[in-house]
Amino acid sequence: MPQPGLHAVLALAMRKTFSKKRWFAFGLVLGALLPDLDGYAQAYGFLVQGISNEAAEAIYHRTLTHSLFFAAAIALLFYLLSLWRGNAEINYLGLGMATGIALIHSFVDIFAWFDGVGLLWPIWEINLWSGVIVPESVARLLRSANFLAFGWYFAYLLSLAGRVGMDRAYLPRLRLYMYLQLGLGVVFSVLAFVLPGGLYNTIDGAVLLLAATPNVLWVSWRMRATIEA
C-alpha cells in the first residue's frame, strides 16, 4: 500500500481542497479507502489457491481498483445515477470517490510501499521501486502499521467530531475502535519478530486486516456528517 488508513487521513486533511460541494468530501474519503479492497482477491489467492503471499500480491494487488480506468468508471456510473435520480449530489459523491481513488490513493501509492501501481491496468504499470528489495522484517512492520493507520484515522475522526460537534452519540464506540486498532498495531509489531512468515501473513493480513476493512467503511459512513461538516 501504504496503509489504507493513511490514505483516509490524507483524504480527511484535504477534504475541502478540491470541492466544497455536498457529498464530495465523503466521496473523497471513500475513494481513498476503496482501492485496497483488492486485498480480498489477494487473500483468495493466498488462502484458497495456495499461492505465496508475494505471488498473490503481484497478481491481484494494485491492479484493477488502482487504475485510472476504475476511477473514471466510478465517476461515470455516479454521473449516470445522478441523471437518473435528478440529484446532482450523487454526481459530486462519484467525483469525490474518483478523486480519492486516483489522487489520494493511487498517486500516493506510486511513491510508497516499494511496489508498482497498475495506473493504466492492464495496459501499463508504473514502478519506481523495481530494483529495491525490502527485508522481510520491514515488510512485516509495514503490514502491522496498517492497524496503527486505522487507529490514526479513527483518532482524526474523533478530533474532527469534537471540533464540529457532530456524531457525538457514536464517539464512545469510535474511541473503542481506535484503541482496538492501535492495540493490534502494537501486538503485531511485536509478533512480526516472533511468528513464522506464513502464519503471520495469515493472521495479520488474511484475517484481521480483512475483518477491519468493512468496519472502517462502516465507520466512515456513520461519521459522514462529521466528514462533510
Image (tube, rainbow, N blue to C red):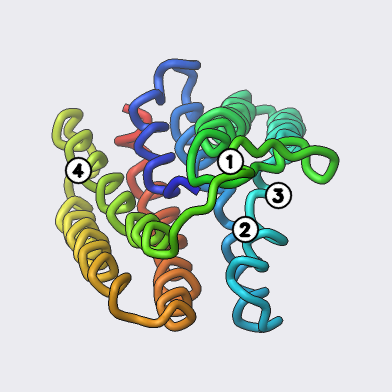
Q: CA distance from mark 4 to mark 3?
A: 33 Å
Mark 4 surroundings: few (<14), some (14-19) or many (≥20) residues within 10 A: many
What's the residue at 38%, 57% (across, down)? 138
Q: Earlier in the sequence, mark 4 or mark 2?
A: 2
* Closer to viewer: mark 2 or mark 1: 1
Q: Secondary structure at mark 2?
A: helix
Q: Which residue is mark 3?
A: 63
The amino acid on which the numbered mark 4 sits, given as a three-letter code, is Leu
Residue displayed at 34% across by 59% down: 141
Q: Position of residue 222 (x, y in %)?
A: 36, 50
Marks 4, 2: nearer the viewer: 2
Label 4 secondary element: helix
- The image quadrant where one finds the C terminus is top left
- Label at residue 129: 1
Q: Earlier in the sequence, mark 4 or mark 1?
A: 1
Q: CA distance from mark 2 to mark 1?
A: 21 Å
Q: Between marks 1 and 3, how big is the CA–CA gap?
A: 16 Å
Q: Earlier in the sequence, mark 1 or mark 3?
A: 3
Which image quarter: residue 209? Answer: bottom left
What element does badge 3 sit on? loop
Relative side of 209 to 193, left or right: right
Q: Mark 4 and mark 3 in contact? Answer it, CB < 8 Å.
A: no
Give the amino acid type for the residue marked by disc 1 in the picture. Answer: Trp
Q: Which residue is mark 4?
A: 158
Viewer-proximal residue among 50 and 65: 50
Q: How many marks?
A: 4
**Where residue 216 appears, x then y in whole percent?**
39, 55
Q: Is residue 149 left or right of residue 117?
A: left
In the picture of the structure, the residue carrying the numbered disc 2 is 38
170 in relation to 76, above or below? below
